[in-house]
Image (cartoon, coloured by chain):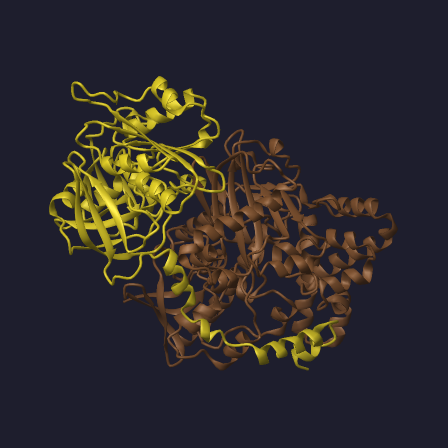
Chain colours: A yellow, B brown
Amino acid sequence: MSEQNLLNSIAGFREAWQAKEALERSGTDFHEIKGEVASTVVQLHPKRLELEVAEVIDETASTRTLRLVATDHSLLPPFQAGQYINLFVEIDGVATARPYAISSSPSQRVYYDLTVKRAQGGFVSNYLLDRVAAGQRFLSSGPMGTFHHNPLYHGDDLVFLAGGSGGAPARSILLDILDRGLSHRFHLVYVNSYIDDVIFDDEFRELANRHENFTLSEVISRPPTGYWGYTGRLTEELLQRLLGDIGNKMFYICGPTPFNDNCVELLTRLGVKRRRIRVEANGAPKAPNEQTGWPEGVSLDDEVTVTVRGRGSFRSRVGEPLLNALERNGYGTENACRSGECSLCRVKLVSGAVFNPQEAHLRKSDRDFGWIYSCVAFPTGDIEIQL
Amino acid sequence: MKHYDAVVIGAGNAGLTAATALQRGGSRTLLLERHNIPGGCATSFVRGDFEFEVALHQLSGLGTKDKPFVMRQLFDKLGVLDKVEFVQEHDLYRLVVPGELDVTLPASWTGLRNLLQGMFPAESEAIERFLLVCEKVSLEGFMTLPKARKANSDAALQSLCPYYVQYGFRSARDVLDEFFSDAKLKNVLATYWLYLGVPPSMLPFPDLAVMLYAYAVFKPWHIKGGSQAMSTALVESFLEAGGEVRFNCGVEKILTEDGRVCAVRLEGGERVSCDAVVSNASPLITFNELLDLERPPLAIQQDFKSRRMGTSAFVIYLGLDCTPQELGVTAASSFIYETLDEEQIHDRMGTLQTPLGGMLTCYNFEDPSAAPPGKSQVMLVCLQYGDVWKSVAPEDYARTKYDFAEKLIALIEKVYPKVRQYIEEVEVATPLTMMRYLNTPGGAIYGFQQSAQDSALLRERLDGVPGLYIAGSWTSMGGFQPTYMAGESTARAVLKQLKVKEVEHV
């Protein structure tokens, strides 16, 4: 007796069999959708973009914009204003990467502008500013990140507190609102150290004059004598004066870490709920040893041995984020945000201990089973990891 | 070139249990995963203070410590039972049809019967009989039907599986109509269809029966740290047994020699030789794209022709700055219908129009550790077919996504009006997101459409290429328990085959 015959006595079996045969006559073997998943996904979330510098634009003494186009001159993937790409570079034999917010408007997809400000001693920013010219090619991640306007709950009364290069995502979000003709109010509180080093200052002023829904408040923290505008650090009083009624405003903060921390504290004191504040991630902390939980007796300058299972080992400084140390020594992992959020650089800690700072957005099970985000992990003793 | 006994492609549920069972069974195994983290659907992501469960709503088949069921044994066998903590849910679900119906079913077989008999006294006797049929069909399907098939005798089938014979291939709609006249009672009992994505008219009755019976008797469960904790625990157990795993490592080709699997080629060109490949990728990608044959074997093409693409999902992950009580949550899982007509709800799943049915799961209702103190982790879902999303132009994608999210939130707001005002974090996943992370055509989350003709009882194993095994939702029922089990049973088949080979070599 064949199995089909056996099951024939189950109510509904014959009908199901016939239905299956009818489907078989009208169906296909799905050969026609071969490759469709990959070709659909790549339009929105390419793993890598092949980019070429079309133009290098001088912004200020400290800052340049790299205008990047697709090497095949096709349109780039859409992005949400405020998002970043992770730019892969090779500098003197070291393969590394840095995430940069896109400063151009998402309304055109011919190019992405990356606006790069020189960081003191910055390995990558100095390279991009001093050694990159039009025609140079790079790989990058696709656009990523959650620091963008979210229409589901952000509302239409937006305040952006930008410090220095934080003006880059602010510009993209602003241009997006203006290009799409949205009625959102956008107030940019733009804090810079020096009056002659303000990125996009002329453009922002001109747009503020032309658009009623865009307000620009400039603050210079180290003003020249005789400067007439707002000066000094942001204070509660100044913010209160600039913002007026807090209402249901949504706040975006992007700048150096001390600036970000200060802004969150000021807004909290003004009664802003934490859920109405978005802070852009900002790389690994410079002073993890000042955070709670840092082991006693361990100094940032201590040396430790990092062993990569089955591949080799090297000496490293405690204060250097593990991912950077790996890259400097010829290893690497996938990575994107380099700030402890995207988790792409997750590696297994086989033995030893690392310090996971508050920036490390680890999953519960990562903690339970010894997985770490190498971009923000600090080895506090000798460690072995598995790549 | 490196050699392994087995290579497992994909660290989804079935890939993970297959790899772990293989390695623990003594077979040298390499587990490959395209992403940086194991789990496939069974994963989590962190935003701000929240770790979001991606896919697990209610884990079935576990049973309690006192009355354990198959999944407890399976997890024990795979070495992960003591690596995770389970949290029991006390209700099956709350079903709300505003203005029509609002009922919460307890996760208890007698409690369920009492509640329904109290609500629908006129159908009291039918309820009793119906639940008995659910129980018998579930147990027979699990225990005695395989025996009868092995015996291959009609007499055995009739005596071992009397209920299965009477109901085994009928639709849920058909059986509900036979038992009940009250339409709302039928709605209440059929609600789990919304988990599976096929309406009661297409849903095989045993699938519904087993969900009701198994969840009520063996309880619905969450996992602390989410399904990601189980995925990571399985990797841990796999590594402890000596397995090798590579993340961020996609497979380009499955290579054959004389029609038999001999190796895989990884992205980047590296070749790894092996005796067996277990693919946790969809069989469509496996046979039509990964396998190095121009066309898959005829039997497999034939099988594909009678399949239809299953459902995907649209999901909103919400981190709320309020407690479940402030939100008004009274059960972890709520289903919300706009209409009592399930067929209409299903028809909408192929469109971008306002969904007519959706669900809300509040993870910290029963497990306080699932959200920071004072906050809530909530997931809104409506199942949706992926086709309509494939035609959205890339530049319109974000807007389309948010527009549709507004529609789903509007549906949920009818029962939970405060859901929008406390949002602290939100992430939206569309069928294209599922496609991206699961690598499935149509962003399918349960494989092929699970109507009666999809049943494994109507089909042969997809074993046309020696050494190539398929494990996952596409060749079994979708969901967590079935895929965990599918991986482990596939591993057993592989181990058996590898042993045979070993003996041949001696």
Residue in the picture at 25% in, 36% down: A165
Residue A307 horizontal/vertical position (percent): 24, 45
Q: Quadrant of residue B473?
A: bottom right
Q: Residue furthest front?
A: A210
Q: Nearer the viewer, residue B202 or A7?
A: B202
- The reply to whether residue B127 is in sight is yes
Q: Position of residue B68 (x, y in %)?
A: 63, 48
In which quadrant of the rendered image does the N terminus of chain B lie? bottom left
Residue shown at the point (65%, 75%) measured from the top left: A19
Residue A268, by quadrant, is top left
The image quadrant where one finds the C terminus of chain B is bottom left
- From where the camera sits, is residue B34 visible? no
**For residue B295, side relative to residue A304 (left or right):** right
Horizontal and vertical percent position of residue B288 = 43, 73
Residue A81, by quadrant, is top left
At x 53%, y 51%, the residue is B404
- In this view of the protein, which residue sits in the foreground, A206 or A247? A206
| Left or right of residue A286: residue A360 | right
Residue A324 position, x and y percent, is 23, 42
